[in-house]
Image (cartoon, helix red, strand yellow):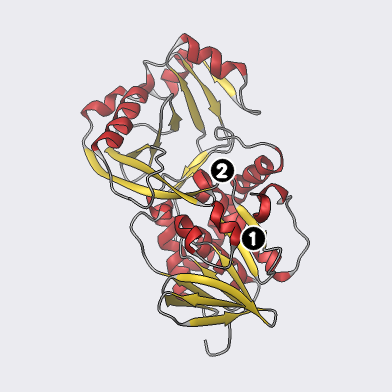
Amino acid sequence: MTRAPDTIVAGGGIVGLCVALAASRRGKTVVIVSESRPGEASPAAAGMLAPAVERSVGAAHDFAVAARAFYPEFLELIADAGGTRVPINRLGVLQLALTDRGVRGLRKDPPPGSSWLSRDELVSLEPALGHGLGAVFNPDDGAVDNVVLMSALETLIESDPRIARTAGVVVKVGGKGGDAVVGLSTGDTISGGDVVLAPGAWAASIEGAPALKAVTPCKGQLVAFQSIGLRHVVYGPRGYLVPRINGITIAGSTMEYTGFDASTTPEGLARVHSAAREIAPGLSVSPVTAEWAGLRPVTPDMLPLIGRDTENPSIVYACGHSRNGILLAPLTAEAVAGILAGDSPKHDLSQFRPGRF
């Protein structure tokens, strides 16, 4: 790509890749600036698509529900463009009750569209949860295999003639003559029409974009077990389980504000193991296949920053997705591509305005 790109994307996680592809589909040229870092959230996540369980309020909740609804279409776009069928679990999500108090709590304010499963109904659906007293069943929630998804996105990026990649870390952004100017850690600069900021947990280190100061890293430790036959995503009192078709079940997760330390700890893993066995006791004898940690980019209200910078409109934010980056990334990308094209917004993004902190 010899001329200045229409769009520079800072970050190569799921949000950055989705933005690049969405912009390319609208005919824009794109340069992605990124390099791999330990603890990146996108490959480390469990891949849940669960806005009914992890509820927001107002327009933010509506956006999350729309993001869930968009996923099948999004995965079809990927399959049509690159041939990869990304596994998605659309069986629904269970919120498991293990005590009488848990039953009362779950039945007090159930998500819209959900239903209560008795103990017998629960056992019939998931024999591995036979110790449970019942569960809330959320039929529209589920999970996606984010590891396969990231690989599919990378493949599409590599084959897209409108998208180029530059290895490096964006450390500064600004504007000149209406265009964006991006400074890299190498001392090099790149100019383009707009810069989209999707730098993950490291957002606050970028100069010139004040809204990014609201983003902090939050570590989550996870464990993968050999499958015990669980089919549904299950939330328990202290954690969750996400089964995948490759024969593993992912258990998570902690919420630790420990800076950029992406290492696992005995204490953190012990909490995940304990929460997982509480949900499905059969995991106590299931082999562990992997243990790891990721760094979520978290904002104070757990909602992302999406929109143009009020002082420098060539800067567009698409970051800080907290616990819901996998869920929100494809629809965030569509919204950002619309912003770049000057289209009227299809969704209410007011709760995501970058300058709210």
Name above or below for residue 59 compared with residue 79: above
Give the class, few, some or many, for how many residues have Cα within 10 Å of label 2's Cα (few <14, many ≥20). some
Local SS, label 2:
loop
Give the class, few, some or many, for how many residues have Cα within 10 Å of label 1's Cα (few <14, many ≥20). some
Drawn side of residue 192 relative to residue 155, left or right: right
Please report the residue visible at 33 percent of the width from the left and 50 percent of the height from the top. Answer: 261
Outermost residue, top side: 100
Local SS, label 1:
helix
Res 105 visible: yes
Name above or below for residue 219 compared with residue 108: below
Mark closer to the observer (2, 1):
2
Numbered badge on residue 350: none
Drawn side of residue 61 relative to residue 278, left or right: right
Q: Mark 1 points at which residue?
A: 334
Drawn side of residue 63 relative to residue 262, left or right: right
Question: Closer to the camera, 210 or 30?
Answer: 210
Question: Closer to the camera, 344 or 318?
Answer: 318
Q: Mark 2 points at which residue?
A: 302
Res 353 visible: no
Drawn side of residue 84 relative to residue 209, left or right: left
- Disc 2 residue type? Met
Please report the residue visible at 43 percent of the width from the left and 52 percent of the height from the top. Answer: 146
